[in-house]
Image: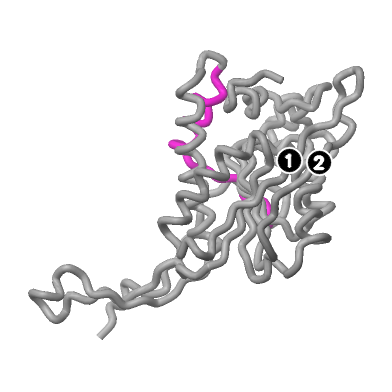
Amino acid sequence: MVDINHLTLSYTPSEQEHRYGDKIHLLSQPFLQSLLARLCDQTTGQPAINWIVEHLYQELAAVVVNAEFEQLQTRINTRMIDHNPEGVFEGDIVDPDSRVVLVDLARAGMLPSFVALEYFNHVLNPRHVRLDHIFINRAVNEANEVIGTHMAGHKIGGDIEGAMVLFPDPMGATGGSMCDAVNVYKSTISGTAKKLIALHLIITPEYVHRVTAEHPDLIVYALRLDRGLSDDEVLASVPGAYPGREKGLNEHQYIVPGAGGLGEIINNSYV
């Protein structure tokens, strides 16, 4: 007889209230918020920077797996099988044959993507887990204003048919890089993904508005929403209540309060 306690595991992540729609998930987890605050602190440097990023993405990946991946009933003999015939576990686990494509948006997304790759290789069948690379960066004018994105190329290892396609990228600022990356998979790569999911540490209202407009099927998970340049009434309101007045980007399209350039501090390379 199977223990019903082991079947049909349910999971609902703790989330903050907002008005952005059901594809946007703003997590409400004090422990992760505390680690993220330390990451953003101007006194935090290497090697603490990368240690924090690694742990935040391990936790964020776990939330996404719990909430979005399919389960499969399994049966295994435990180490107690030699002593008791009931030493058998039968219950639901994450489907180990889930197909996963991780997308590294170089350079800020390099470390998070490799962390997620190692994580998934321990939980899933490594033969079904792949890491792709897109070389993309902001395009700016002479006034250092963001005017778009520049994609230098990509290394994509195959189709995405039935795959969970994940984009672990720390900062969702303007949404330009994310939208361009998603476009690559929708327009040039064979197959239809099961889900497209972005994993961020911090996002802005400007990011949310752009990605939901251009890719309404993109699922977004973020630890924090920053809209620090909004007026007091907006800051006292539920996110999304005043969509035209929320502001999280300064004149150079950096997030406020934010964390500065994560690509710079993760790589300790300030170019």
Location of the C terminus by quadrant is top right
Residue visible at 79% across and 27% down in the picture: 253
Label 1, residues with CA under 10 Å away: few <14, some 14-19, many ≥20? some
Location of the N terminus by quadrant is bottom left
Residue 145 location in percent, x, y? Answer: 87, 24
- Would you identify the image quadrant in which residue 204 lies? top right
- Would you identify the image quadrant in which residue 21 lies? bottom right
- Tell me, yes or no, if residue 101 can be seen here: yes
Residue visible at 83% across and 22% down in the picture: 251
Q: How many marks?
A: 2
- Tell me, yes or no, if residue 241 can be seen here: no
Residue 57 location in percent, x, y? Answer: 51, 42
Residue visible at 50% across and 18% down in the picture: 44
Tag 1 or tag 2, which sits nearer the N-term? Answer: 1
Residue 209 located left or right of residue 28 = right
- Label placed on residue 151: 2
In the image shown, does 191 or 43 lie closer to the viewer? 191
| Residues shaded magenta | 23-41
Report which residue position mark 1 lands on.
135
Residue 258 on the magenta span: no
Label 2, residues with CA under 10 Å away: few <14, some 14-19, many ≥20? some
Residue 74 location in percent, x, y? Answer: 36, 76
- Colour mode? one colour
State the SS at label 1.
strand
Q: CA distance from mark 2 to mark 1?
A: 6 Å
Residue visible at 17% across and 68% down in the picture: 79
